[in-house]
Every structure is written in C-alpha cells, then in structure tokens.
Image (cartoon, helix red, strand yellow):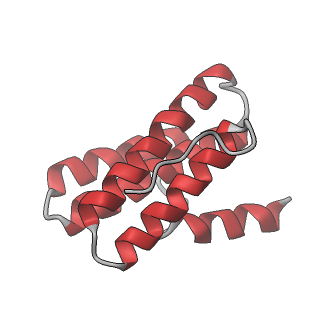
C-alpha cells in the first residue's frame, strides 16, 4: 500500500490522492487495498466536513467517499454494510434522486463542470 503525507500541506488534496490510489487498486482487483485507501480518504473528509459543515463541496466529497466504500463493500458481497454506506451518502446529499458516481474521478469531473 502506498503511503501519503499531506499533499502540499493540504488535507483535501490528500483525500483525493487517496481516492485515486483506491481507484487504481480497485481497477487492479485489490478490493481490500482499495477499501483501505477509500476509508483513509473518508477519515480526512469527515474531519474537513465537520470543521466546515456549511461547505457544500466538503459535504459532496464526504458523500462520494461513502459511495466509494459502498461500491467496494457491494463487490465484496457485504450488501448490508454497502447499503448502510449508500444511505449515509444519500443522507448527506439530502435526497435520493441524485446519481451516485461509480468512481471518485468521475465525481471530480462532474464537480469541476459545475464550477
């Protein structure tokens, strides 16, 4: 597993870097490693979101982390915990009608288009 320090002293960038590592591990079939990387990212994003609960971008990033974890848990056959993770994401988004991105890099692309 690759280890990261805070990227440029910026925890937000570190969380995205950990997502990219998780994406690569997922694509290589390493679900355990991907889950670990996504959970590391989630930990950073939970802290950032709690420090700035009105920041919609931080809340969105947090919901993407729950989606990523849910996807891995689903692929591992842990459907109960996957559903919990997806519900955590939906609770943050505030509605069930928003699409759930499959990969974090797709979510970043769509967020970038909104700016």
Residue 95 position within the rendered picture, expressed as x and y whole percent measured from the top left: 52, 48
- Farthest bottom residue? 28
Side of 83 where 15 appears, left or right: right
Residue under the point 43% across and 42% down = 40
Q: Quadrant of residue 6?
A: top right
- Farthest right residue? 115
Residue under the point 17% across and 64% down = 76
Q: Report if residue 7 is visible in the image.
A: yes
Residue under the point 55% across and 26% down = 47
- Farthest top residue? 51
Residue 19 position within the rendered picture, expressed as x and y whole percent measured from the top left: 51, 57
Return the residue nearer the eye: 58 or 38.
38
Q: How many marks?
A: 0
Q: Quadrant of residue 110?
A: bottom right
Examine the rendered structure and indicate whether residue 69 appears above or below residue 112.
above
Q: Report if residue 90 is visible in the image.
A: no
Side of 69 where 106 appears, left or right: right
Residue 115 position within the rendered picture, expressed as x and y whole percent measured from the top left: 86, 59
Which quarter of the figure is the N terminus placed in?
bottom left
Return the residue nearer the eye: 5 or 67.
5
Return the residue nearer the eye: 88 or 103.
103
Residue 53 position within the rendered picture, expressed as x and y whole percent measured from the top left: 65, 25
Return the residue nearer the eye: 21 or 52.
21
Residue under the point 28% across and 76% down = 29
């Amino acid at each position: 597993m690759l280890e990261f320090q805070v990227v440029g002293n910026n925890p937000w960038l570190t969380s995205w870097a950990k997502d990219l590592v998780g994406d690569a591990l997922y694509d290589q079939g390493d679900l355990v490693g991907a889950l670990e990387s996504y959970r590391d990212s989630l930990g950073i994003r939970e802290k950032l979101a709690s420090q700035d609960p009105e920041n919609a971008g931080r809340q969105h990033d947090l919901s993407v982390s729950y989606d990523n974890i849910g996807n891995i848990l689903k692929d591992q056959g842990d459907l109960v915990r996957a559903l919990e993770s997806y519900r955590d994401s939906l609770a943050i988004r505030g509605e069930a009608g928003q699409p759930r991105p499959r990969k974090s890099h797709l979510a970043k692309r769509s967020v970038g288009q909104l700016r």
